[in-house]
Image (cartoon, grey):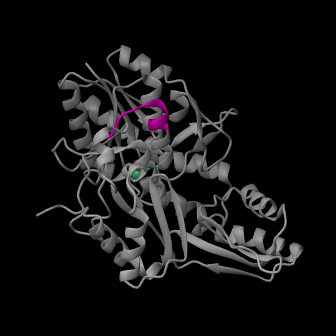
């Protein structure tokens, strides 16, 4: 008998009928002899609806109150599923983040999980009751409700699987796995049978929005095998996110990801002396803005340029910090470009194969695409370009690395 955490996303519980279908699937898993813990998102569109409602009260709703409001979406879903299970004769129990003892830090609207007690989940399992847990929410030390950031139910599910030492965490969504790239851009994109945690982490943070990045970090740190599956299909296929193995290393590039939600900020004519970068990025960090790529040119006559990217939603905040600093240090100018895209290739095989970067740059050059910024890690190469080239770049790279389904 295995213990499986099943997480169902918003589209999987989007209507009463879909919730009934989830109940059936949970019951089927139980009948197959496995123990199930269910984690749910809010019904699709609900979190957005609540956010919009909050914005009718204030342009910048208080984040403590916002978290309480947003947490209700998941509560609706768990109560409904527990009713559906009970109506079918299966004992079930809805549990909120507080009841499960999901304790987070204090950062409202994007809190990080610090510990998971899960006593009531274990208690339910011991009684033969199916626990149905609200995703996306926890409480801070003061017992105020917090939420984990958009897509946070994935993280609830994996953290709970880790705490319970579950055999697997199955993430049910509206796609049947992780693909070599976005099938909306490249129709021949292929589903990956398996992907390593590290690759998935890169793909997730690069804008392939199948799993919340934090959930992959949890899975990697606690060795939780995660399966991404479609709740709209009966096929038990999907993609397994797991430890890297030999077979994976044979493949040089596993996928092409893109991210159109970044903005580039350039500081021109910055005095080239110790402490400037520390002040710049220290100021941005204090605003809780995450900086991605950073490039600094060699200096000429004691002046240099620094470019970096931030999430587009945070561009204004970052610009405020940068503009103020620019005045203080006497930089020449600050520029913001927000119609950029970051296109990346990812693969653990890059560690042991050479020439991958060259192929990427040649491919982009052939398409006449100008590269604005480049960054690399052991298993990833990213290029920033004009947003209008996103599709072209993704298609060309997917082709160049032979990633498509072979006819
Ligand atoms: N309901 C939340 C959201 O829409 C959390 C989740 O779905 O994972 O972001
Ligand atoms: Mg999601």
Q: Residue at x 66, y 53 (%)?
A: 63
Q: Residue at x 77, y 57 (%)?
A: 282
Q: Position of residue 291 (x, y in %)?
A: 64, 61
Front residue (pair 303, 149):
303
User: In the image, is residue 226 part of the stretch drawn in magenta?
Assistant: yes
User: In the image, is residue 93 part of the stretch drawn in magenta?
Assistant: no
Numbered marks: total: 0
**Res 184 visible:** no
Most extreme residue toward the top is: 126
Left or right relative to 77: residue 264: right
Left or right relative to 258: residue 17: left
Q: Residue at x 82, y 80 (%)?
A: 301
Most extreme residue toward the bottom is: 368
Front residue (pair 17, 232):
232
Front residue (pair 34, 176):
176
The quarter holding residue 227 reads top left
Q: Position of residue 304 (x, y in %)?
A: 76, 76
Instruction: Say if 267 sits above or below 257 in the image.
Output: below
Q: Position of residue 318 (x, y in %)?
A: 70, 68
Instruction: Say if 388 sits above or below 54 in the image.
Output: below
Left or right relative to 206: residue 263: right
- Residues in magenta, as a range: 218-227
Q: Residue at x 40, y 58 (%)?
A: 354
Q: Quadrant of the C terminus?
A: bottom left
Most extreme residue toward the front is: 354
**Res 69 visible:** yes
The quarter holding residue 129 reads top left
Most extreme residue toward the left is: 407
Q: Position of residue 86 (x, y in %)?
A: 28, 29
């Amino acid at each position: 008998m295995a213990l499986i955490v099943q997480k169902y996303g918003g589209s999987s519980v989007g209507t009463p009928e879909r919730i009934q279908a989830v109940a059936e699937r949970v019951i089927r898993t139980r009948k197959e002899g496995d123990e199930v813990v269910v984690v749910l998102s809010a019904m699709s569109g609900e979190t957005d609806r609540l956010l919009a409602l909050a914005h009718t009260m204030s342009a910048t709703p208080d984040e403590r109150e916002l978290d309480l409001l947003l947490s209700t979406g998941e509560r609706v879903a768990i109560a409904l599923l527990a009713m559906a299970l009970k109506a079918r004769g299966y004992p079930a129990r809805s549990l909120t983040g507080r009841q499960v003892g999901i304790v987070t830090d204090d950062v409202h609207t994007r809190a990080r999980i610090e510990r998971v007690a899960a006593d009531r989940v274990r208690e339910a399992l011991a009684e033969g009751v199916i626990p149905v847990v609200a995703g996306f929410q926890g409480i801070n030390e003061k017992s105020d409700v917090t939420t984990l950031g958009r897509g946070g139910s994935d993280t609830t599910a994996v953290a709970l699987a880790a705490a319970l030492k579950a055999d697997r965490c199955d993430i049910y969504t509206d796609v049947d796995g992780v693909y070599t790239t976005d099938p909306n851009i490249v129709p021949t994109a292929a589903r990956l049978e398996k992907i390593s945690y590290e690759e998935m982490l890169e793909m997730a943070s690069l804008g392939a929005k199948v799993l919340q990045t934090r959930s992959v970090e949890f899975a990697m740190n606690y060795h939780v095998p995660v399966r991404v599956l479609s709740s709209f299909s009966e096929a038990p296929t999907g993609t397994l996110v797991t430890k890297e193995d030999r077979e994976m290393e044979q493949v040089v590039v596993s996928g092409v990801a893109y991210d159109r939600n970044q903005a580039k900020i350039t500081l021109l004519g910055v005095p080239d002396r110790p402490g400037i970068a520390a002040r710049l990025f220290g100021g941005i960090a204090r605003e809780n803005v995450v900086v991605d790529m950073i490039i600094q040119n060699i200096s000429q006559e004691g002046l240099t340029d620094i470019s970096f990217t931030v999430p587009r939603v945070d561009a204004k905040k970052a610009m405020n910090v940068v503009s103020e600093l620019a005045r203080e240090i006497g930089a020449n100018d600050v520029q913001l470009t927000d119609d950029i895209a970051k296109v990346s290739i990812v693969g653990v095989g890059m560690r042991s194969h050479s020439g991958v970067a060259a192929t990427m740059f040649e491919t982009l050059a052939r398409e006449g695409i100008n590269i604005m910024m480049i960054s690399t890690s052991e298993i990833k190469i990213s290029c920033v370009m004009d947003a209008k080239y996103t599709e072209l770049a993704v298609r060309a790279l997917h082709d160049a690395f032979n990633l498509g389904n072979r006819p």
